[in-house]
Amino acid sequence: MEKERNFHNYLRLWNFLSHRRKIQFYLLLILIVLTSLSEVISLGALLPFLGVLIAPEKIFEISFLKDIWVLFDLTSPNQLLLPITVLFAVGALVAGGMRLLLLYVSTRLTFAMSADISLEIYRRTLYQPYSVHIARNSADVISSIMGKSNGVVYYTISPLMTLATSLIILTVIMATLIMFNPMISLVVFCIFGSFYLFVALRSKTRLQRNGKVANDNIALLQRALQEGLGGIRDVLIDGSQRFYVNIYQRADIPYRKSLGDNIYISTSPRYTMESLGMAIMAVFAYRLSETTGSLISIIPLLGALAMGAQRMLPVLQQAYTAWSNLKIGTSTLGDVLDLLDQPLPRFATEPDPPAMPFQKEIRLESVSYHYNSNSKIVLDHLSITIPKGGRVGIVGKTGSGKSTLLDLIMGLIDPTEGKLFIDGIELNADNLRSWQRNIAHVPQFIYLSDNSIAENIALGVTKENIDLARVRRAAEKAQIANYIESLPLKYDEQVGERGVRLSGGQRQRIGIARALYKEASVIVFDEATSALDVETEKAVMGAIEGLGRELTILMIAHRLSTVEKCEQIIELESGKIKR
């Protein structure tokens, strides 16, 4: 069952690779075969090279080389020394060069595949519905995109390539050694192979357990870092550093311990096999010298076998390490594949549609909403009509459903019951993106990237495509242009991480300018003026009021003074319209 599941996961991963990557992988397999053949050349040249140096006359007794001597009319040992020396040196250089080329190509391809996977996870995550995002912890998602996608490189893609390479090279080396001495070669390979097989069976469960521990704790580490550094002001004021350090420590110690244990299990057989290999070669040298009666005559054969073993042992170790990493990465691969399986909406692969025509009204008919079947109802059979160009204020206590109502209107969530109409056309999956092209949103907490003011006002637009005249107009309407113009770099001034160099009111006004830059027909203010002082709020509201009747404004507020100029005020209570 476990083998079938793992094979199925590898097949799923393969199916996610692009056509280009698959072709590159097939070309890599051809390079692996060529590298293996270069090993044959270097090993095949070693036996005659040692023979010419130590026992020249014996070289003519090697049966599978006799045809070569006849072909080139070589009859004297002295004639062999130079060409065989050159052949051996060239073979060794070619084999080394091919190994380096294989390492370079396989490494490049591995990390290119990793980039593809990481990008696809991020793309699919961004396209998930709002209801999916609010149900997740962002630290878990970030750790999956960054840490776990890297884990797939180190514990799945790279090991699979290494395992394929090792098996092909091992097969070729073994076939070459059998040509020299079948019995000794098979005995040596069986001893080495049996040892690695024994270690693999003993460590299989431990490796998988350690892999799961590491996979589970990397998300906890990400969360501890994000929460501790994200609330650094409160951490410093409250003196709660020890609390977050303890959280980090509880996740970090088992994570590091599992990684260290895995490294030991993966690399330790190498040292045992090196000493065991030397002992085996000593035994065979003793037996062969007794059998032939001449130590000099067997040195070429022993040299070839020793070099073959020296090539074979690292490859065996690589194959075992790759297998170990595959076992470690089982849990990580499953998590990454789940993220890659996230469905994409149809519009994800299509160009942005034009904005949906909006001329008359937004109408909600008996709309209800609850987050899941076990949760209480958030909105209860609301019927509301909002005319185009209207100013609608939405008030109510915390938890009354104000933000959920706006999320429904913006198409971020679908109603559990009832329907939403735009100019009589029902909002559905087919026209959702067209409707959202009409909407600009100003939240209570404005996200600011660590870029310039202009880039934050035109968020989502590349720097070279920003319309600076449009940015200035938006800033003037949001009552922040005077402040920006007073700065040394004006609109190129950096705001710092999360807008740390700005006051709360300034951040809020940049958020309003961002919405105005979009030039949408509907602007949604979700407590967007709560951080402003009374005078600034009046100035901003006055500017908003003068934007023109083609602009529809929906506004959530706690202060009645904020919505007093709205033509329609809706008070919600427990998901229903109170008045």
Image (tube, rainbow, N blue to C red):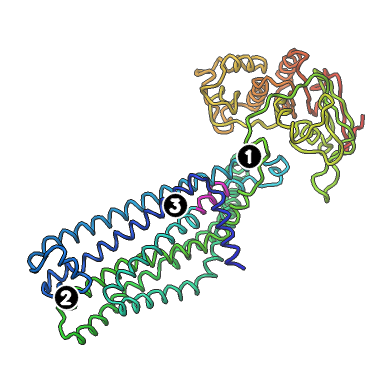
Number of residues whose C-alpha sits closer than 10 Å to that of mark 3, classed few (under 14), some (14–19) or many (20 or more): few
Q: Determine if the magenta segment contains residue 151.
A: yes
Mark 2: amino acid: Glu
**Which residue was labeled with disc 3?**
26
Q: Can residue 237 be seen in this view?
A: no
**Which residue was labeled with disc 2?**
61
Percent coordinates x, y for residue 101 in the rendering: 33, 51
**Which residue was labeled with disc 1?**
126
Number of residues whose C-alpha sits closer than 10 Å to that of mark 2, classed few (under 14), some (14–19) or many (20 or more): few
For residue 117, side relative to residue 58 (left or right) = right
Q: What element carries label 3?
A: helix
Mark 3: amino acid: Tyr
Residue 396, quarter of picture: top right
Q: Give the range drawn in magenta.
A: 143-152
Name the quadrant of the N terminus. Answer: bottom right
Q: Foreground: 244 or 338?
A: 338
